Amino acid sequence: MPLFRRRAVLTEIEPAAIPVPRFSIDGWTLTGTPLADKLAARLPRSDLRELETLLHGIAVEVDTPYTYERAAVLLERSGEPGPALSVCEAWLAHPAAKWPEYAQHTRGVERHRARLRSRLSARPVATSG
């Protein structure tokens, strides 16, 4: 019986789409995606370039947890917790998340996912009137 730690009732959170960058002559770019303008306004150019490369790695399902961790941090920092949560869940669904050498990273991603879920479930629900 938890005395001081109450477990929040988890509400159903709809998964947000993970933006997929497209190939350009300079590498990968999010130009033309729905989040491109928001991300460009909220992130420094160097972080945006890094995020574009990380999101490409996620799209091709790389086996490195850092790719997913860092992309989730950058998306959350830019004010996009929905796609950040989807990135965390993409890592946890990946077969490499169960490898023993990535156990510590997987626990970190699980904690990040729990934090994002609690933030998203605490948001007021918009009612249509």
Image (tube, rainbow, N blue to C red):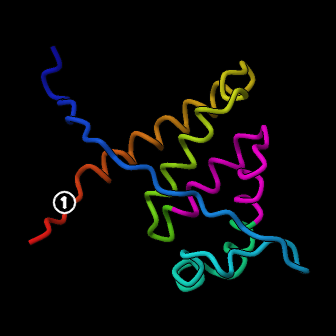
Question: Measuring 68% from the left and 63% from the top, which residue is drawn there?
Answer: 20
Total marks shown come to 1
Q: Amino acid at mark 1?
A: Val
Q: Residue furthest left?
A: 129
- Provide the residue designation for mark 1: 125
Q: Quadrant of residue 82?
A: bottom left
Question: Measuring 21% from the left and 30% from the top, which residue is drawn there?
Answer: 7
Residue 79: x %, y % from top left: 44, 69
Magenta stretch, main secondary structure class: helix
Residue 107: x %, y % from top left: 55, 30
Whether residue 13 is in magenta: the answer is: no
Nearest to the observer: residue 2 or residue 11: 11
Q: Quadrant of residue 104?
A: top right
Residue 43 sits above or below residue 14 on the image = below
Question: Measuring 91% from the left and 80% from the top, which residue is drawn there?
Answer: 25
Q: Is residue 5 left or right of residue 24?
A: left
Whether residue 66 is in magenta: the answer is: yes
Q: Is residue 84 left or right of residue 124?
A: right
Residue 41 sits above or below residue 127 on the image = below
Residue 42: x %, y % from top left: 52, 80
Nearest to the observer: residue 18 or residue 1: 18
Q: Residue furthest front?
A: 129
Residue 75 sits above or below residue 47 on the image = above
Q: Is residue 79 left or right of residue 1?
A: right
Quadrant where the C terminus is found in the figure: bottom left
Residue stretch in magenta: 53-75
Q: Quadrant of residue 56?
A: bottom right
